[in-house]
Image: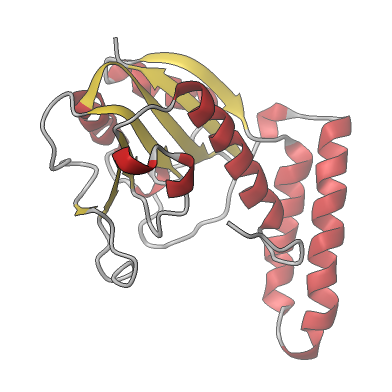
Amino acid sequence: MRLSLFSVNWLVLRLHREHLERAIRGYGQGPLLDLGCGRQSHRDLAPQDRYVGLEVDRVRYAHTPPQVWGSGLHLPFGNDCFATVLCAQVLEHVPEPGQLMAEVHRVLRGGGHLILTAPHIWGVHEEPHDYFRFTGFGLAHLARQAGMEAVEVWPLAGYWVTAGARFCYYLQHFERGPLCLLVRPLYAVVQLAAWALDRLHRVEGDAWNFLLIARKP
């Protein structure tokens, strides 16, 4: 995935990908289910011959179809099929997150892992299908309720990245016409400053996103 420093979401996409790479290196094995795969932008991080992408939105992703169409609330797979389930930035769009977690538990093999990211502080998006925000404690609770063990939970950044990212999305309202020449360089300045400040003073309670790794016993 090629990211531009002058795009509105360069920093959060970069950090999200770095953390997913770390998680998949440590816990990812095949066969891997990418639940809510969208355009399959994380496919290159998974075992290529043992990757299954699942997506529910047939209209939005008609030109980049997944391996399987289906819903995370009723996964079209048998029990104990996958060694890893990846669920990146999907849970907030699911009206019954507990049911999705129960389905993940069902299709995971014993000893398999769920790698999941979800927002904590973020604006409303993909409306009207935007239902929840999650703390790390909430994600761990959902995993335990589904019968899994929360192995690790970590924030993807702290306050400064959250503030910088949200400010850039505010600036996006002005990214039109000749103002583009001003706004796009501002994206770069704000995001680089936010990244540097976050390294100097990381306030993780204001993280924009959390990553959960949970294990099926």
In the picture provided, is 36 more to the left or to the right than 150?
A: left
Which residue does the image show at 66% across and 48% down from the upper left? 14
Callout count: 0
In the picture provided, is 93 more to the left or to the right than 26?
A: left
Viewer-closest of 183 and 36: 36
Viewer-closest of 216 and 63: 63
Residue 138 seen by the camera: no
Which residue does the image show at 54% across and 36% down from the upper left? 20
Residue 164 seen by the camera: yes
Residue 206 at x, y = what percent?
68, 35
Residue 71 at x, y = what percent?
21, 48
Which image quarter is the C terminus in? top left
Which image quarter is the N terminus in? bottom right
Q: Tell me, what colour scheme is on the image?
A: secondary structure
Q: Is residue 52 above or below residue 63?
A: above
Q: Is residue 56 above or below residue 18?
A: below
Which residue does the image show at 38% across and 43% down from the upper left? 48
Residue 12 at x, y = what percent?
65, 49
Residue found farthest to the front? 49
In the picture provided, is 112 more to the left or to the right than 188?
A: left
Residue found farthest to the bottom? 177
Viewer-closest of 95 and 165: 165
Which residue does the image show at 69% across and 57% down from the upper left? 10
- Which image quadrant is residue 155 in? top right
Residue 151 at x, y = what percent?
46, 14
